[in-house]
Structure formats: C-alpha cells, structure tokens
Image (cartoon, rainbow, N blue to C red):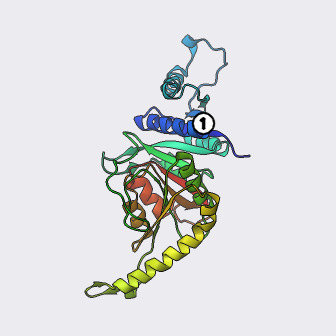
Amino acid sequence: MESQVITVGLDGSPESRAAAQWAADEADRRQAVLRLLHAWILLAAQAPDTSPDLDQNAAVRQLVDQVANEVRERHPHLQIMEDLVGAEAEVALLQAAEESRMLVLGSRALAPWESFALGDTSLAVVGRADVPVVLVRGGGHTEPPRKQSTDAGPPVAEPRVVAGVSLNGPCDPLLAFAFDTAANRGLPLQVVHGRALPVHAYAPWGIEPEVAEEVVKEAEEKLRETLLPWRERFPDVPVRLTVLPESPTRAVVQAVSGAELLAVGRRRHRPFLAPRVGPVAHAAIHHVRCPVVVVAHD
C-alpha cells in the first residue's frame, strides 16, 4: 500500500517554508498527511516531558511549530506531523523518503531570474531517493501565462503539468506520476521530447528541413505509442505532445514556461562513476523556475 505521507524538509530558510506550503497544498489535494521534518546531528536527546525552560531544542521546535501554524492558516483540517530528528540531514531525509509518498525540499535561486542552487545534501537526496523528490523555489511557483498553442505545436504557456520523456527505455514511474498529478490538479499534461538531429541533417546553408521533419515525425509516432496505455488509463487528462529537434535538455528547458510543475526522470542504475542525476534532470533543477519533481525509474 502506498504511503499517504508527504514529507518536507525544513531548515529555516524562506525556500524551505515555500516548500512546506507547496507540500501542504499537495497533501490537502491528495488527502495525505504532511510531515514537517527538521534534522540536525547535534539535536539534543531529552525526555518528552522536559520543561520549556530546559529544552535545548527550543529554537528548532519553535521553527517547526511556526511553519505548522502557517500551514494551518491555509489548511485548517490538514493532518500534520512535526518531526525532529537527531541525525545528518541526508540520512534523515532518505529514511523519511522510504516512509513517504513524496519528499519536498526547498531550493535557493542564484538570482531572481536565474536558477536553482542545490546544496550537497539536496543533490545527494535527489540522486538516491526512490520516491519522487520535489524541489521548490521561494517567491512563487510559476511564471505568468503568455500565449496558447495547438497540439504538437510550439511550447504552450498555460497552467499545466509538463513531463520530459526519453524514448531510450521504459519510464513508467515518471508517466504514472505525471498523469496522476495532472488528473489530481485538473490540468492538461504536456509531454516533451527532444530529439537531436543527425549529422546529415546539417548543410552549409543550415538545417535540411526534410530531414528534421522526418526525425520529428518518427519521434512523435513513438511517443504516441508510448503514451497510449496511459491515455487509456487517464481518459480525462488532455495530453499535448511537443517534440523538438533539439537536445533533450534544451527541449525541456524551452518548453516549460508557465507550467505549474515539471516532472523529469532519473535512472536508478547508472554507469559506474556517472553522476546520479542525468543531464536533463540536472538542467531542469538548475534552470527551470517552476517546481521540479525528479522521479526515479529503471
């Protein structure tokens, strides 16, 4: 049975508070329990009935209480667990992930318009957790909508869930998360695939349009075939395809403007010494403004 707990890591930063609000919205939407987790290796071990004036953990306990109160203002009926753990943050978060439906973390931006700056702990958790890990920036979740688009046309800019999909292997957990999230939010799902052009597509005067069209058409057909069982399972979710003659990394970053959430995959089993997070997930984490969820799959 799937856990009905959504865990958010708190460190006192504005980004972690934004992550807590995002996680609370998601927990309310999915009728799940919200766990507010703060981990610190130097957290004092003490009896539950320790008086407040002797509580060595008073400051961190106050932090978690404050966030819980902020969450209750928006979600008064949400069930909340407050959890203080005396362990390294990475260890505590990975343990919590095993007991959760998803894990939510805050990410700091290098500049208001620029990117995520992910610390060693967060990056290690993203690269090792088996459950979806959501990264939330502070200061708002999405960009304002700009213009509409047609199916399989240019990237749209309207509220939606976006999934960056590779066709190099199965990615069922990623598609399951993307379709389920779109259904829960009542939003369309935009599935993005980037296909780099072969060498013979390039000529001295530019790109051979016929070759590019053939590459895109082939990828679209394979993508439709991959999505067919999921569209049958989620018939009420409108699906838009965006196949771009670009590298997968550039395609995802270009197509996500205005989205409420971007879902990307991470291979559980990668070559020895290879980064735990692949290039598409890495680019999304560092260059996309909306919340990014990284879903592990085989």
The percent coordinates of residue 88 (x first, y second) are 57, 39
Kindly identify the amino acid type of the residue bearing the numbered disc 1: Ala
Drawn side of residue 284 relative to residue 204, left or right? right
Write the residue at 40% across / 66% down. Answer: 251
Of the pair 257 and 119, the residue shown nearer to us: 257
The percent coordinates of residue 167 (x first, y second) are 55, 71
Identify the element where label 1 is drawn: loop
Of the pair 75 and 153, the residue shown nearer to us: 153
Quarter of the image for residue 151 reads bottom left
Quarter of the image for residue 211 reads bottom left
The percent coordinates of residue 294 (x first, y second) are 53, 54
- Residue 98: in sight, yes or no? yes
Q: Callout 1: 10 Å neighbours few (<14), some, many (20+)?
A: some
Write the residue at 56% across / 50% down. Answer: 183
- Residue 88: in sight, yes or no? no
Assign the C terminus to one quadrant of the image.
bottom right
- The furthest residue to the left: 205
The percent coordinates of residue 60 (x first, y second) are 51, 25
Q: Mark 1 points at which residue?
A: 87
Write the residue at 42% across / 52% down. Answer: 259
Compared with 158, 15 (above or below) is above
Write the residue at 31% across / 53% down. Answer: 146
